Image (cartoon, grey):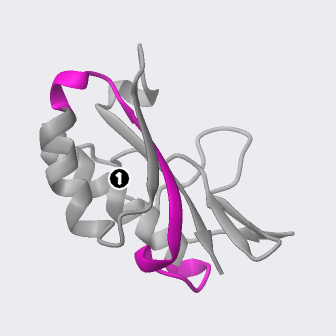
Amino acid sequence: MKVISTNNAPGAIGPYSQGYEVGGLVFTSGQIPVNPATGAIPEGISAQAEWSCKNVGAILEAAGVGFENVVKTTCFLADMGDFAAFNEVYAKFFTSKPARSCVAVKDLPKGVLCEIEAIAEK
């Protein structure tokens, strides 16, 4: 197993890693929309979805893969009413259309509106 770590995505805010590579797969931890350079969280679902995708992308890049290698994502939304706007942004990044689950949850860390985790083939 190999730990994946990059300064181009937010550091873990708990006892976990940004990602792991094992058995030819890359697993990212859930990425919330935090700008890793400033710690800022943007307003609105579209801007937050963009940063969550960028943060997933930074971890994938650190592992030597890209969005085209993603086979599965799990997406968490604070409000299913944001589903269409979230999808619009998500589709710009995950163009290969990986398998996906998308669920609404009661709360997300730091009060954000979305979180994305991914599994990619190495």
Q: Magenta stretch containing residue 74, yes or no?
A: yes
Q: Which residues are magenta?
A: 61-82
Return the x and y of residue 94 as percentages of the image width and height.
33, 66
Q: Is residue 29 at least partly visible in the picture?
A: yes
Q: Is residue 49 above or below residue 62?
A: above
Q: Using the rendered view, name the quadrant where residue 28 is placed.
A: bottom right
Q: Using the rendered view, name the quadrant where residue 11 is placed.
A: bottom right
Q: Magenta stretch containing residue 122, yes or no?
A: no
Return the x and y of residue 40 as percentages of the image width and height.
28, 47
Amino acid of disc 1: Ser
Viewed as shown, does residue 107 lie left or right of 87?
Answer: right
Return the x and y of residue 57 as percentages of the image width and height.
42, 70
Return the x and y of residue 77 as percentages of the image width and height.
33, 30
Report the residue that reaches farthest toward the top.
106
Report the residue that reaches farthest toward the right.
1
Viewed as shown, does residue 1 lie left or right of 53?
Answer: right
State the residue at coordinates (14%, 46%). 46
State the residue at coordinates (58%, 86%). 64
State the residue position of label 1. Answer: 52
The N terminus sits in image quarter: bottom right
